[in-house]
Amino acid sequence: IARKRDPWSLETLILSMDINLAYGDIVGAVENLEVLLRRTPRQRDQWREILRILASEPETSQVVYETLEEDRNKVGVLADLAGSGMDPFALMQAVNKLEVSALFEQDPALVAQITNPIVQRQDYDAAYQVWAALSGAGLKIADPVSLEDDFPPPFGWEFRSSAVGYAGRQKPGIVGEVYGRRSGILARQLRVLPPGFYQLRVDAPQLSDSAEIWSRCTEGPPLVEVEDTSNSVSTQKFGVSENCPAQWLEVRAKANVNAQTRSFAIDAITISEADR
């Protein structure tokens, strides 16, 4: 009845999708879900969850991979599968079956959409495996990603522009401005340092009173802070415990009393092993 009244109404699409699923017509269900994702963005989470379930079941996953047409829906399914706990090998198989490897080369920012859900569930080894495969980094988890390496976040550097200021890459290092009204993150990188003792070195000809460098556990206060580089170079030792499986290395804006805009420049940030 709904189809006769208006074959393109939302009611018809939803009913058709339900019928598709009831009769095992996965192709029809996926086609209707893609239309619903376009037409009802407020219900996106509901439609994506159905796609995720279909893509995670062995009996239906291949049909989903072959039927999905829109790139944003392919990336969305991969992000949802990553967040649900799919192991890295199976996730990369899904990337290959969806034929989206070129998307990550064209737009490296998409790598974080797949990696961040794994980081959020604190499976850092799996997150790094997926990140390294998608970004083509070819690095081991203990290998540092320097300011010179143009790899995407979260294990590469993420640069922000917000009400606290902005930061951007330059060679060598980072430059930006702090607006002085409030503190906050300007740039950051996720590291996975094993338990031990380390030294943070900051080479910054222009940093005092505008920005500071933190290394902190993903959940918790800073392990070490560098805010004074009046001699252009500053080093601080810190320790990482077994309860700190991953760390954020952050460049943070500092608020100042007069809320003045100030610039900063950082040539290099390095972390190396240190004696106790």
Image (cartoon, rainbow, N blue to C red):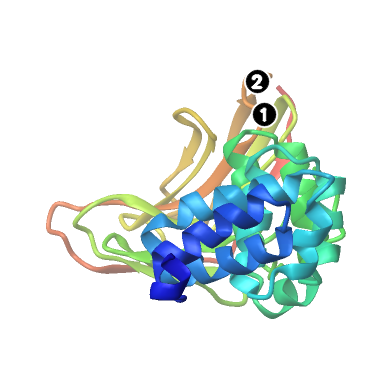
Does 195 sit above or below residue 179? above
Q: Is residue 153 visible?
A: no
Q: Quadrant of the C terminus?
A: top right
Q: Is residue 273 visible?
A: yes
Question: What residue lies at 30% left-to-right and 51% top-to-bottom?
Answer: 254
Does 245 sit above or below residue 30? above
Residue at the top extreme, as displayed: 242
Query: Residue 203 placed where, x, y %?
Result: 57, 58
Question: What residue lies at 34% left-to-right and 50% top-to-bottom?
Answer: 184
Between 241 and 238, the residue placed more toward the observer is 241
Query: Residue 138 placed where, x, y %?
Result: 87, 60
Q: Secondary structure at mark 1?
A: loop
Q: Which residue is mark 1?
A: 245
| Crowdedness near tag 2: few (<14), some (14–19) or many (≥20) residues, C-alpha within 10 Å | few
Question: What residue lies at 14% left-to-right and 52% top-to-bottom?
Answer: 257
Alpha carbon distance from label 1 to label 2: 8 Å
| Crowdedness near tag 1: few (<14), some (14–19) or many (≥20) residues, C-alpha within 10 Å | some
- CB atoms of marks 1 and 2 within 8 Å: no
